[in-house]
Amino acid sequence: MSKVEFLRNNYKTLDIGVDGGVGPNTIQQCADAGANLIVSGSALVRSNNKKQTIHDLRSVVDAAIKGRQLQS
């Protein structure tokens, strides 16, 4: 996540995406590092409740974005 952190620290408004291995157990780390675009294929394919999984993942990213905006 060091690359994501570097980009977020230097480019506050840049859209930064993370793809690969992103799911319920890793989403917080991605969001905290500064990612605001998430690709989460396997986590959704394996989910029994895709709608809830999307909601949960999105909520983590949205909260991190809101937290960064409050710090600005």
Image (cartoon, rainbow, N blue to C red):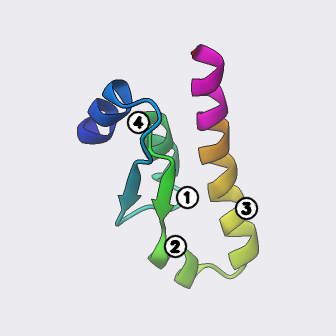
Residue at 66% in and 32% down:
66
Q: Quarter of the image containing the N terminus?
A: top left
**Callout 3: 10 Å neighbours few (<14), some, many (20+)?**
few
Q: Secondary structure at mark 3?
A: helix
Q: Measure the alpha-carbon separation of dots 3 and 4.
A: 20 Å
Q: Which residues are magenta?
A: 64-71
Q: Is residue 20 left or right of residue 45?
A: left
**Of labels 4 and 2, the one closer to you:** 4
Q: Which residue is mark 4?
A: 33
Residue 56 image offset from top left, x and y in percent = 69, 57
Q: Height in image: 9 above or below 42?
A: above
Please name the amino acid that badge 2 sits on: Ala
Q: Which residue is mark 2?
A: 43
Q: Measure the alpha-carbon separation of dots 1 and 3.
A: 11 Å
Q: Which residue is mark 1?
A: 24
The image quadrant of residue 20 is bottom left
Q: Which residue is mark 3?
A: 55
Identify the residue at the far top of this view. Answer: 71
Answer with mark 4 or mark 1, whichever residue precedes in sequence.
Answer: 1
Q: Are marks 1 and 2 in contact (CB under 8 Å)?
A: yes
Q: Height in image: 21 above or below 6?
A: below
Q: Secondary structure at mark 2?
A: helix
Residue 39 image offset from top left, x and y in percent = 46, 66
**Callout 1: 10 Å neighbours few (<14), some, many (20+)?**
some
Please name the amino acid that badge 3 sits on: His
Counting every numbered tag in the picture gives: 4
Q: Are marks 3 and 2 in contact (CB under 8 Å)?
A: no
